[in-house]
Amino acid sequence: MNRIIWLFIIAAMATKTLAQEVNSDKVKVGDAAPVFKIQTIDGQPFDLAQLKGKVVYINFFATWCGPCMKELPFVEQEIWKNISNPNFVMLVIGREHTPEELMKFRSDKGFTFPLAADTKREIFDKYATQNIPRNLVIDKMGKIVYFKHGFTEEEFQQMVNLIKGLL
């Protein structure tokens, strides 16, 4: 009997974990992107509401996240250095990091893409409750056309191709 109870408890915990994974998104493809304003660590303003007419790519990451560290070199090379278009804007947002932490991180890693600090998760919380890295592509009308978490090279390349196709 104890074995059955333990199996039930383990199954319930696994179900709860899977439900949290599935329900971590607050928005979905087709939704209008929640707008926000933030300043990059270089002092540049970023106002999503002012970017209608442009394709926007946003990445949420944390410096302690292993998959994020695998993905960011691809962000640097495949997107930041490879997509040059006046109708394209991108921002990489450090979830729960300070501007000072991100300045050191960028210097240590040699990244050159625009970075902003979401110290209190206020921006991230508009889009999801958990799970990073997260990639978000917003079309010229302000609609979400891509929204996924995790990192695989294949999915990343599909996203890059989508961005290029939108431009």
Image (tube, rainbow, N blue to C red):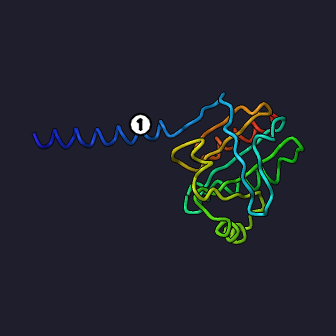
Q: Is residue 62 above or below residue 53?
A: below
- Mark 1 element type: helix
Find residue 14 and report its image quarter. Answer: top left
Q: Is residue 10 above or below residue 71?
A: above
Q: Is residue 8 left or right of residue 118?
A: left
Q: Is residue 73 above or below residue 154?
A: below
Residue at the spot of label 1: 19
Residue at x 16%, y 38% (from the top left corner): 4
Q: Residue furthest left?
A: 1
- Give x and y (percent) for residue 46: 77, 50
Q: Nearer the viewer, residue 91 or 152?
A: 91
Q: Is residue 89 left or right of residue 60?
A: right
- Give x and y (percent) for residue 75: 72, 52
- Give x and y (percent) for residue 106: 71, 66
- Give x and y (percent) for residue 153: 64, 47
Q: Residue furthest top?
A: 30
Residue at x 41%, y 39% (from the top left corner): 18
